[in-house]
Amino acid sequence: MSNSSGAVTDRRQGPELDRAAGRSTLGPEGEAAVATLLRLCGEAPDRAGLAETPRRVAETLAALTSGYGQDLDAILRGAIFEERYDEMVLVKDIELYSLCEHHLLPFHGVVHVAYIPRGRIVGLGTLPRVVEVFARRLQVQERLTTEIAETLQRYLEPRGVAVVIEASQLCMSMRGVAQRGSRTVTSCMTGIFRQDPRTRGELLSLIRPTAGP
Ligand code: ZN
């Protein structure tokens, strides 16, 4: 494969880092685009309340899409250890905020990540970082679920991986497509979680919300 597919490569590099400001931004072109959108919405982008809005939105969007520029390999390679533990590892309720790629509106909720090791474990704090690398891109919940699971399968080569995401899609509730408060659940399971109903059942009983008092 040639390396000349410039468009794709550029997109994956993600937002530039404004080193002087110490934060990501979409730059002057991004700010101008936001001002244009404001004008098309019927606003006056130069009125006092909106004067700083193009800059803020350009920085916010850059931060929310910073996952394109993250080096997954660097995050994971240093965080994997040889270990003989072979029971289920489950990190529940990892906070999730992402942007739907169809409307650029947030979806938010929780991610549960489980795996059964085969000689290798990953630092527990690394799992939320992996979630964030993929969440800070334009996403659909289904693909986000699969990407997290496939990444852990590839790096850990465990007996199985399970990723379950429960999230509310603002593009559904704000636009009135679904009843407010509805949640979407997606899951991706590999290996023993897919093959063995008992293992899958154990996982689902562990992530079920605990009954209130
Ligand atoms: Zn959407």
Image (cartoon, rainbow, N blue to C red):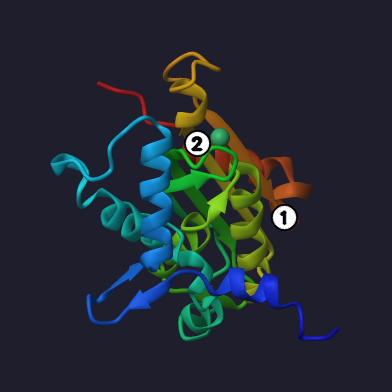
Residue 104 in view of the camera: yes
The quarter of the rendered structure image containing the C terminus is top left
Residue farthest along the right direction in this orientation: 1
Rendered location of residue 150, percent (x, y): 67, 62
Q: Does the residue labelled 2 lie within 8 Å of ligand 1?
A: no
| Residue drawn at x 59%, y 71% as measured from the top left | 12
Give the residue pinned by disc 1. Answer: 190
Question: CB of residue at label 1: within 8 Å of ligand 1?
Answer: no
Callouts 1 and 2 close, C-beta under 8 Å = no
**Considering the numbered disc 1 on the image, is that residue within a helix, a strand or a loop?**
loop
Q: In this view, does 176 lie to the left or right of 155?
A: left
Is there any visible trace of residue 96 in the rendered image?
no
Quadrant location of residue 64? bottom left
| Residue farthest along the left direction in this orientation | 48
Q: How far apart are marks 1 and 2 (CA)?
A: 18 Å
**Viewer-proximal residue among 105 and 6:** 6
Say which of 102 and 195 sits in front. 102
For disc 2, the marked residue is 166
Q: Is residue 126 above or below residue 179?
A: below
User: On screen, 158 above or below 205?
Assistant: below
User: Taking 54 as reference, is 203 left or right?
Assistant: right
Q: Quadrant of residue 8?
A: bottom right
- For label 1, count other residues whose C-alpha is less than 10 Å away and answer few (under 14), some (14-19) or many (20+): some
Element marked by disc 2? strand
In the image, what residue type sits under mark 2? Answer: Glu
Ligand 1 sits in which quadrant? Answer: top right
Q: Which is more foreground, mark 1 or mark 2?
A: 2
